[in-house]
Image (cartoon, rainbow, N blue to C red):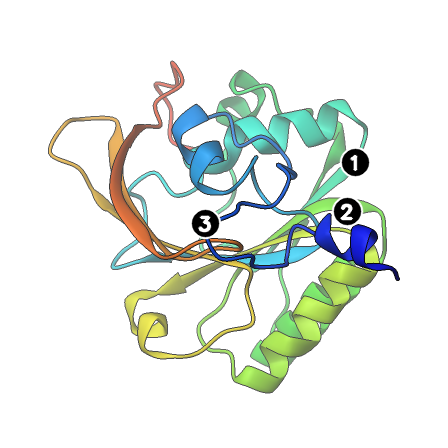
Amino acid sequence: MNLEDLMQRADLWRGGCAPPPSGLASGYAQLDALLNGGWPQGTLIEIITAHRGIGELRLLLPALASLTEEKRWLAFVAPPYIPYAPALACAGVQLAHVLQIQPRTHTDTLWALEQALRSGSCGAVLAWLQQADGKSLRRLQLAAEAGDSLGFLFRSATACRESSPAAVRLRLAPARVDNRVSLEVLKRRGGWPTGPLDLEVNHALALSAFS
């Protein structure tokens, strides 16, 4: 790889000079600006919350809908509740390209997650992890790179104290206004942590994404 090719890489930090925009549009212009064009492909992205149900899944719906429009699969691995099909469809997600995987053990969850990321068939894999050590996360990051997939990991607030190979780490909290979330960027490629940023995540959905 020559220097010119190297300088085009989105994962190269160049001081005050931002890399060329790249990634899957999130559906939020302000967030895309912070992430240099959107969700970076072939990476892990951690969504960290103190508790569930504050809008973390609705934050992803515009991107997930666009992936299914391209006939790419979405895999839900170990979701805490059954995804609510009418809400997903209302957001534009094509249900014919959605898979739900419910492993019995934590080890099975990590295995299923790695296989889905590495398969090359999934545009995005969403997983709810109770715990994950550095070695497991590195394997998942390599799998996401190999499959050119987005790996969205929903993790608890304790994950903030742990290191992670994820390209993006976001911390979400409820905002003071309904249908909004307060978002902090704890880690991103080509930039420093930043936030908070209030985003509206309603998208005309009157239904929760989970039943």
Residue carrying label 2: 122
Residue projecting furthest to the left: 176
| Residue at figure coordinates x 56%, y 57% from the top left | 14
Amino acid identity at mark 3: Tyr
Q: Nearer the viewer, residue 14 or 73?
A: 14
Give the class, few, some or many, for how many residues have Cα within 10 Å of label 2's Cα (few <14, many ≥20).
Answer: many
Mark 1: secondary structure: loop
Which label lies toward us, 1 or 3? 1
Instruction: Compare marks 1 and 2 and give the one earlier in the sequence.
Output: 1
Instruction: Compare marks 1 and 3 and give the one earlier in the sequence.
Output: 1
Numbered label tally: 3
| Residue at figure coordinates x 77%, y 46% from the top left | 122
Residue projecting furthest to the right: 1
Amino acid identity at mark 2: Cys
- Label at residue 72: 1
Q: Nearer the viewer, residue 122 or 20?
A: 20
Query: Real-space Cα distance between discs 1 and 3?
Result: 23 Å
Q: Where is the N terminus found, in terms of image quarters? A: bottom right
